[in-house]
Image: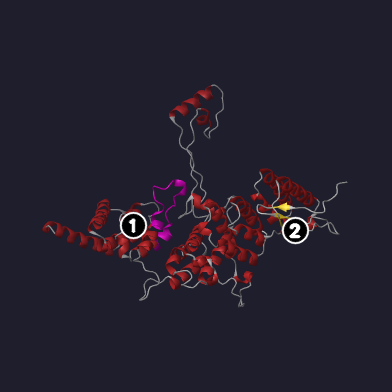
Amino acid sequence: MQTLPKRSRISGPVGTLSPPLKRKRGGEVDLSAAAPMAPASEAEELAALDKALTALGFTDDAKLERVLHVLTPRVVEQMGSQFASSQKKTMQILAHVNKRLTAQPSMKLPLTALVTLYCDDTKPQIVKNFALLYVERAFQRADAREKAREILRALNGVAARSPAHAEIILRAAITGLAVPEKDLGMAGSSDDEFDVNTFSFLKQPPDRALFLKHALEYLLYQPNSFGHAPVAAPAPSPAVVAMRAVANVAGVVTPPDGGAEASAGAAAPPQVTASPPGLSQTSVARLLGPTGTAPATRDLAEKKLNLLHLFRRASDTTVPPPELLMLYLVASTDADHEVQKLGEDLLRRRCAWDTNRPLVNLEDEKIARSLYRAFLGGDQTVPEIARATPASPAMKIKLVNLLCRSVTAANLFPYTVQAIFTCLYGEGTTTFKSGGHGAGGVGTEARHGRAAQASLAVAAERDAEAAGQRRGGRWVWSCGGWRACYCWWRRYRTRRRNGS
């Protein structure tokens, strides 16, 4: 019968940890005591790891959680060893831990110790990579308060992390922070541990900007907004029809779903998965994670509501209103009624732009460009897989309302002309409202735009007038848009005749 070791030495890259692995009464392995020792050789590290793997194998499931709380961070840290043989042995221990954890889905892991290990900038990158993997696994098994407490630590400096690490942290941030106040114990409590205005990452502009960008993508995600309609197969070519006729005469059965094309070597055109309005395929993959599983509709709506309540509790000094404008605009057009109602309320109270002291300045060029970019979608120079789709029709109506109030937006060429042509001739503009708002954009451009840009707007007006387009039995444009374009065109023609 194999005997258990009385003592094991688990060494790290800077020293040796010697936790006693002797078995206590009841079969539990004691890993509580550890003291830094002198650097170990490769043979000593391998011997210590072998003893740890043996002791872990003899630990029953009832005592495994307590053992893993001590052993997991130390084994992950051992990945930073300078010896390849030690790293290989460490991988064997982690593989054994993964098998035991798969059979115990409710077993908790030391989330606090793993986050501390990940946030330690003195550790090698390989240690941080493995630490984050187990942080993600431990995060799924922790309670709400522990999740929120530890994700706030991980969000500090998230903008400086690698993109792959930042995606994992931001997905965990939505899960840990977009929760009801009662789950965090904040209802009726004076504890400011989870007060939004005390979050240190929100006080750092790069970290705050990255978190708000991810929150905007989460609010934009509506899995039912783009549907799953099947794509019609293209008609077969004459050559394929002839081959099918010959095959039928010969008594060979050909499948009607393009089997002949495949046999003839014709490659099927690549099918591009549709994305929700305002998102790209890359953004959707970043939101859903490696599993790619879409959340349930009710769970998605609850997360969005809790995320909006999180921003509602933030003061204007913690998160400036201009940075929340796009989030509230998107929420006000959400498919869920409760999310839409809360988004409209926050947009009206926290992002007012039509008062004597507006909270959001629509003449800011950065805001105007963000509105145009949301309206038009991603730039054509961006690869299709990473190019954001244009906004939804309901979102476009709100965006045009704001753009028509800005003189700065009227002078942003070529965004102005692109937006006008999208309203008049783009896809999804068959409603009377879209056409009317397109005419409003033409009128705004004619009144406030530069001469070169305004002449293009008037040219668009003349083309539509010549075409005599009617939609739904009504003229596409409002009388105000027609009158403004005509008056500006007459003044422009008079100046051209006078040579001014």
**Crowding at label 2, few (<14), some or many (≥20) Cα neighbours within 10 Å?**
some
Residue 388 on the magenta segment: yes
Residue 500 in the image, given as x and y percentages of width and height = 13, 59
Task: Tell me the quarter of the picture where residue 24 sits.
Answer: bottom right
**Crowding at label 1, few (<14), some or many (≥20) Cα neighbours within 10 Å?**
few
Q: Is residue 250 above or below residue 434?
A: above
- The foreground one among 409 and 196 is 196
Q: Residue at x 31, y 63 (%)?
A: 408
- The foreground one among 470 and 97 is 97
Give the mark, 2 or 1, whose residue is nearer the N terminus.
2
Q: Is residue 156 above or below residue 466?
A: below
Say which residue label 2 marks: 65
- Disc 2 vs disc 1: Cβ atoms closer than 8 Å? no
Residue 131 in the image, given as x and y percentages of width and height = 63, 54
Front tag of 2 and 1: 2
Tell me the distance, in whole angstroms, between the alpha carbons under discs 2 and 1.
71 Å
Say which residue label 1 marks: 473
Q: Give, as a single range, the part of the protein colored magenta.
A: 373-398
Residue 225 in the image, given as x and y percentages of width and height = 49, 55
Q: Amino acid at mark 2?
A: Glu
